[in-house]
Amino acid sequence: MAFTGFIGPVVILAVKQDSCFVKFHSLQAVIWLGFLGVWAVNLILGVVYTINANRGERAAYPVFGEVAAAGERMTIKGRTTRLETR
């Protein structure tokens, strides 16, 4: 239900390719809704990982967790990072 607002502008963009006016406004809506989606995912991950940290559990953001663990030997969700402690 949350992603239904994204479908309308994408369909209109696909159907009305010849109108610059419609293309501009539908593309603007798609970009804006994409930005809000990224923001919402970041907010949810932030809350969940804050709760995990408060419990003393380690959790890593996708992709960036490995970067944050660099230079230190840490176990993140059952796997050990490749980089050793100096």
Image: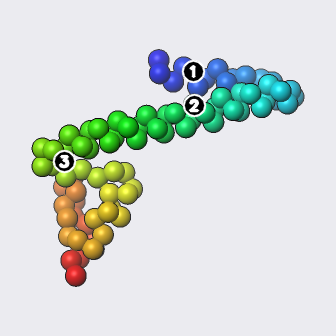
- Which residue in the protein does label 3 denote? 53
Left or right: 23, with 65 as reference point: right
The coloring applied to the image is: rainbow
Confirm or deny contact between disc 2 and disc 1 (CB under 8 A). yes
Residue drawn where x is 20% and y is 40% of the image: 51
Q: Are there few (<14), some (14-19), or many (20+) residues within 10 Å of tag 1?
A: few
Q: Earlier in the sequence, mark 3 or mark 2?
A: 2
Instruction: Give the structural element (helix, strand or loop) at label 3.
Output: helix
Q: From the viewer's perspective, is 2 left or right of 26? A: left
Proximity of marks 3 and 2: CB atoms separated by less than 8 Å: no
Report the disc number at residue 13: none
User: What residue would you read off at disc 1?
Assistant: 5
Amino acid found under the numbered disc labelled 3? Ala
The residue at which mark 2 appears reads as: 33
Residue positioned 32% across, 57% down in the render: 65
Disc with the residue nearer the chain's start (2 vs 1): 1
